[in-house]
Amino acid sequence: MTANELFEDGNRLFRDDLYWAALLRYGQAEEAGMDSALLHYNTGVAHYRAGQHIRARESLEKAAGATRLRVLAHYNLGLNAYALGDMDEALDWFRRARDQEEKPKISRYARKAITRIRRAQREADLVATRAEERREERQRSFGNLDLYARVGFASDDNVFRTPAEPYVDFSNPDRPLIVPEVRSGTYLPLRLGARYIINSLPYEGFYGAYRLAGRYYQDEELENANAYRHELSFGNEYVRAGDERKREVYSAFKITQVDETYYDPDDGAAREVGGADIGERFDYLRYGPELRLRQSYGRLTIGTVLIGQLRDYEDVEAVPSYDHEYFRLGLHVQYRFRPTSLLRVNVEKSSRRYSDRPSFDLDGNRFITNPTLRYDYLVASLTARQRINRSMWFGFEYERTDREDRFVGYNDYVRDHYGFEFRWSPGRRFDLDLDAYYRNYDYPNAFAFNEPTQAGKTLETAQARLSASYRFMRDLSLVLDARLRDNVSNDLRIQYERSQFGLSLHWEP
């Protein structure tokens, strides 16, 4: 058979819905010397009908180079991209088919296809749509004031993160046998927040915000586990979205006060040194600027974060202070392969520089004559997320952290983090979140109990959190939280298991 005869036989097979057989004939026609736009077009459509969308795109793009087939090829490339699930590419091809004047009928079909895709995109994420509606309702009701409050009741089976079994404290020269007492109890979790925005320009606004987070234990014997955090921030936000571009800039100055007790995990009592109470050692004031930028170009998003903080801890005369400077610089790149899947790469560099706390030397001693402590961190992470349907998605994360102790490297470590997240919103009222991670620390130089006679320090942590919320009123939700954590280490002072369960009301007008 000649090339033309093979091509015509392929067309006959295509009309009989025998697409694989037609593709065989089209391939034979090409091998026989035929190289025409019509052959590429028919091959592309046959691949599309056979479900081979990548090959269909290649053939149809070749056919689009011919003037007489350009419009038809653009429209079919839109159909092919839609079948692949790439709505952005489909819209691009349909717009080209819509904007031509040679074939009005194809233009009408393309316009209808664009309308269907736009409608589907608006309905794709019901959770985001509901959140936007609630935000608009708040703005109509309160102007630019956002409020939220969350209060509840929770249980904790290991309040002070107490080791699960007796151990010999090798950090003490007397080597005492410690018999920890695990304490359980109930507490009130509390979260409050307010944020007010003044829109001084069309895309820009100045805001002030306040947040409170804390927990209050009911038993007086557990009050050392109480903790509170107050944060006041003010800054500027700029958001401007174009056709396929979006720019976001957030800058703020934050002031945070943290109040918590420096307690002994073995019995929950405030720590003492030489008879002096140092329980307030962990109270601190944190303040400094923060800048976040995010730029989107269609599927590609690039962002950066810059943070500088001073942390002023409560002065206690018996021991060195935890006062330090904290700096962080990060860059992330995110790419959406399809509307339902994305990949994100993040790299961060940070540093903690203490002003009073001496470093450890290589035998685990911390002499007052040692240089002050400085830790530098390098973090690289990879996150992948996949949407299953309109109401469900999941993601995986891998993160590697390299910490450098700048004195002699005693407290160096490399940490591998493996994370999983799952979100499900089966209805307009119900949301389910599941997060879990596993972390493995590799200390090349540190010893368990900071004692050279012991083995090298090891640490593994695992945590799982489940949160389910049910919105029974427009502004009011009932939230169930469960959290499990397990620390495993040969330094038995920091090995513990803990589970927390809570039920709370969340109000967000």
Image: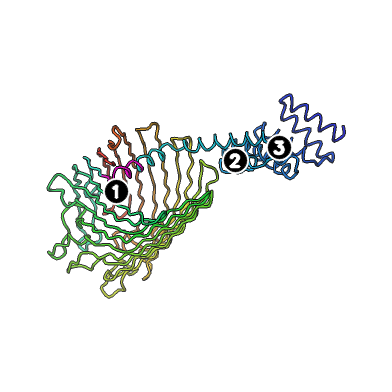
Quadrant including the C terminus: top left
Residue positioned most to the right: 2
N-terminal of the two: label 1 or label 2?
2
User: How far from the left and from the top, in percent, is residue 302?
Assistant: 49, 55
Measuring 41% from the left and 59% from the top, which residue is drawn there?
305
Measuring 43% from the left and 53% from the top, which residue is drawn there?
239
Q: Residues within 10 Å of mark 1 (few under 14, many from 20)?
A: some
Label 1 or label 2, whichever lies nearer to me, is: 1
N-terminal of the two: label 3 or label 2?
3
Residue labelled with disc 3: 44
Residue labelled with disc 2: 90
User: How far from the left and from the top, in percent, is residue 347?
Assistant: 46, 58
Q: Residues within 10 Å of mark 3 (few under 14, many from 20)?
A: many
Residue positioned most to the top: 16
Residue labelled with disc 1: 145
From the viewer's perspective, tell me whether residue 390 is left or right of residue 478.
right
Q: Is residue 146 magenta?
A: yes
The amino acid pointed to by label 3 is: Gly
Q: Over which residues does the magenta segment extend?
A: 136-148
Label 1 or label 3, whichever lies nearer to me, is: 1
- What separation in Å lies between label 1 and label 3 (alpha carbons)? 55 Å
Give residue 1's mark: none
The amino acid pointed to by label 2 is: Ala
Helix, strand or loop under label 3: helix
Measuring 71% from the left and 25% from the top, which residue is drawn there?
17
Q: Locate residue 75: give its quadrant.
A: top right
**Front one among 186 and 175:** 186
Residue positioned most to the bottom: 369
Quadrant including the N terminus: top right
User: How far from the left and from the top, in percent, is residue 483?
Assistant: 30, 42
In the rendered view, tell whether residue 31 sits above or below residue 440: above
User: How far from the left and from the top, in percent, is residue 113?
Assistant: 58, 35
